[in-house]
Amino acid sequence: MDRMTLSIDGQIVAAEKGVTVLEAALENGIYVPNLCYHSDLKPVGVCRLCIVEIKGRGLAPACMTPAEEGMVVKTETSDIRNIRRTAAELLILNHHADCLSCTKNTKCRLQEVANYLGIDEKRLKRLRTPQRNLAIDSSNPFFDRDMNRCILCGICIRTCDNINGAGAIDFVFRGYNTTVGTFQDKPLLESNCESCGECLVRCPVGALSPKTSQVPAREVKTVCPYCGCGCSIYLGVRGDKVVSSRGDAEGPANHGRLCVKGRFGIEFVNHAERLTSPLIRKDGQFVKASWDEALNLVATKLAGYKGDQFAAVSSAKCTNEDNYVFQKFARALMGTNNIDHCARL
Amino acid sequence: MSFEAARQQATKEWKELQSGAVPLVYIGTATCGRSAGALRLLDAVRAELDKRKAAAQIVEVGCLGMCYAEPLVTVRKPNGTAVCYGNVTKDRAAEFVENCIVGDKPPADLVLGSIGEKSVPGVPDLFSIPALRPQVRRILRNCGSIDATNMNHYLAHGGYTGFARALQAGREKVIAELRDSGLRGRGGAGFPTWRKWQFCIDAKGDRKYIICNADEGDPGAFMNRSLLEGDPHVVLEGLLIAGFTIGASEGYIYCRAEYPLALERLRTAFGQMEKYGLLGDNILDSGFSFHVKIKEGAGAFVCGEETALIASIEGKRGMPRPRPPFPAVSGLWGKPTVINNVETLASVALILQNGAAWYAQAGTEKSRGTKTFALAGKVKCTGLIEVPFGIKLRDVVYGIGGGILNDKEFKAVQTGGPSGGCLPAAWLESPVDYESLAAAGSIVGSGGMVVMDEDNCMVDVARYFLDFTQKESCGECVPCRLGTKQMLDILKDITAGKGRPGDIELLLELAEGIKRGSLCGLGQTAPNPVLTTVKYFRSEYEAHIHEKKCPARVCKPLIHYRILTDKCKGCGLCLKNCPATAITGENKKIHVVDQSKCVKCGVCLEKCPRKFSAVECVPGAALQ
């Protein structure tokens, strides 16, 4: 792969051709504050925190500037500090600072920026604190949207547009009233949001937070049981219960992405009404039975049917191997091709 | 019909019109004239002419620029004399027809000046009156004197000869001509036009675009509107030249939907151009094809910024993106694109019609040519003006503008729209050009010019402009979205008497962060009104913050009204009119304002008979 060298803060660093100055810096372990950048998305240069000085060009957003051979970059000057400080102070001032109750606490990118820049309470007190309390959109059954915590980096919008392709959200209104909204600013549930939650996992702050997920004690790598796609997931476990699910970035089928079912639907395993043993109807009532009892009953009853009297419908929740055996059973034993599967739809 | 034959035919028609046997009546019916009642006047004049069975030919024309005297009418008599009249309202239509069209006894209060070589006894030459003498009308030369819906009028005035010349000369010569002319973009930034075009020529792309920016969003600015309404073809000729030179076969005109008449004029013009073979495939058999589309803007100020404008044409939310890449390299649909302002394109047409040397005669070394400005605010003669670069601000304010309304004292002039700076009297001697205005902390911008007098509070002015830019910010980048709001909140506090020590320094600090940190021109220039008012009128800020006084007596929480005991005659007019029942007093006895009830509306001051002048507005809140 083509490499190039450039100077960042006097360090000569190597980077792959085609990367931006920000990516070159981050890859080489040089932190440049940033909020609106996400490695999965096209950069937009709107948070203005990654502004760096490029010799011969002046100030430029590092996320939007292609790195070039021999480029000389400074990530820290008094000019840059002032610009970053103004932007960061204004963001913090307009952000609900109830960090301890926020799901993103300790993983929040705004905290990271504030920590790096060193926010001074005294300086914040000189500014006018906005008295704004926006309603939380909790219409979506899986996650809440709290615009009081939103920094308008636009990552959710770009994700919805470019990764999911739903285009359910965009910037709406102007000026200070600008916000992320749906068509006609209706609740998320009434929009064409597919609840895939891809925005949620990329939100750098706590503006989008899952309704039920808990921090797991350990994670188990597995394959999503919902459909035949074979998305690789990590199930989070506390004690003996599944409490979370996340996409596996290394998963060849999904590259970390999940749909609404894989991300938010796994917890059905904990549902009180979930069947955990076979039931046999006796005198009009379902009665718990052992697997042997149940299989014997089915085998006895099936013996009375043959060929087109029989049809087999299978489920995508079963493994490929199970499904293979099931169709083999239908064809070889029951003598029919009447076989269907929910994943066909 | 060949282009040359069409031109000759048009010239012949124009001459016949001028030498007709009946009076020729030009009525300015552009938007500005219409707001002053020009259409009602038009109906009234027609009715009056019918009633008298008098013959006259009426021509609807664009705007001459003298807003202060609208509706404007010019009457050309068969003997070749032509007189321009102002303030011709509908009510005076009958009198006007009798004395100015049919007869020859023009009322002195309507006469503005004569037009043309033939002088009229007792009437000054229109272009030598103070409001017009310092002006050099090139871009606006046809505005107010030709029918914008008749392409022959434009052709008779050298129209499209610039384009014909460009076709003949080839793109390299066009670029050379533009470079020699010294034309800089009239949209505000003043980037050399030829260079922008050259970038686009050099950029690789199977398709290129030319866009005319007619999104004129500055409050109080109407230069582009007037030009499009009064002489649309000059802009379209510039667009054709640009398309031909950069190799674009498609052009867009991004015009705000709030300009219905300009849009109508453009659409009419397209049809005429097609008829003459100046639009479509293989124009004038040159092999050059050009098609143009109109995109109506929905009134967002930020869509005047070129990358936001492109996003808007593409059907996205009008939000700017960082440059580079510049549109000349990657613009509309990712293709190389040139975006020029209406006035820039009109100037291009003029340069190709008359040559670079002619164009460069006007202006200064670095700012060549003329520039149109919308002169507004506290001057006697407001209007659309065109001046050569290098004219002194004083000549604009006191010459063309006729001085300050009611002969009050000049305080500041704001140039460049809401993102411009407010310059004090000391800068009146400064020339109007890109460099001088930038040195003063302001900008030429698209050409807004607002004059303020002693009654304007500069803190309040800054608050007003910040309120505008804050509301019009696209909300995308942090410094502009949150920074302008923070500055506005501080300014609101200061004007409400809640300013804190240190606020001025805080404003300056924020301004710097917003200027340097914002993504596009809107944010980068939004703090200008604050920076210049702090720089030139700091004492007003200090009075608001430290003394809790508004010296200009504008900010209500920082003023109070009182009745002077030695002057009050107890007439009771103030008491009767006070909406807050804050005034007490008996007949023929001194009246008193109850400060706790007073809403500071100023009605008492207004109603107190001038001979008494017993009510006064005083800076500072009242002592309770």
Image (spheres, rainbow, N blue to C red):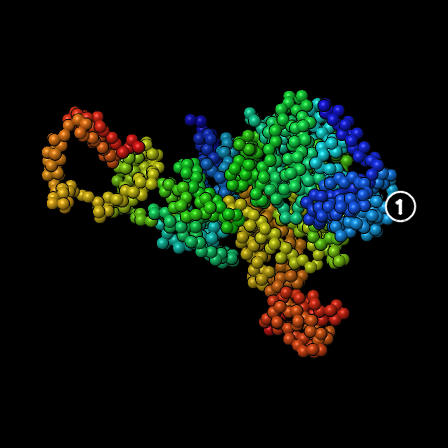
In which chain is the residue bearing label 1?
B
* Viewer-side residue, B159 vs B364: B159
* Viewer-side residue, B529 vs B284: B284
Residue B349: x and y in percent read 70, 32
Picture layout, residue B460 above or below residue A150 = below
| Mark 1 Cα-neighbour bin, 10 Å: few <14, some 14–19, many ≥20 | few
* Viewer-side residue, A306 vs B498: A306
Residue B146: x and y in percent read 75, 37
On-image quarter of the N terminus of chain B: top right
Residue A119: x and y in percent read 46, 52
Apparent side of residue A296 relative to residue B316 in the rendered image (left or right)? left
Instruction: Decide if residue B254 is in sight here.
Output: yes
- Give me the residue at 44% from left, 27% from top: A2
- Give me the residue at 59% from left, 51% from top: B468
- Give me the residue at 78% from left, 51% from top: B92
- Give me the residue at 63% from left, 48% from top: B219
- In the picture of the structure, the residue carrying the numbered disc 1 is B121
Residue B557: x and y in percent read 60, 64
Dot 1: element: loop
Q: Amino acid at mark 1?
A: Pro
Apparent side of residue A286 relative to residue B480 in the rendered image (left or right)? left
Instruction: Decide if residue B440 is in sight here.
Output: no
Question: Quadrant of residue B373 in the image?
Answer: top right
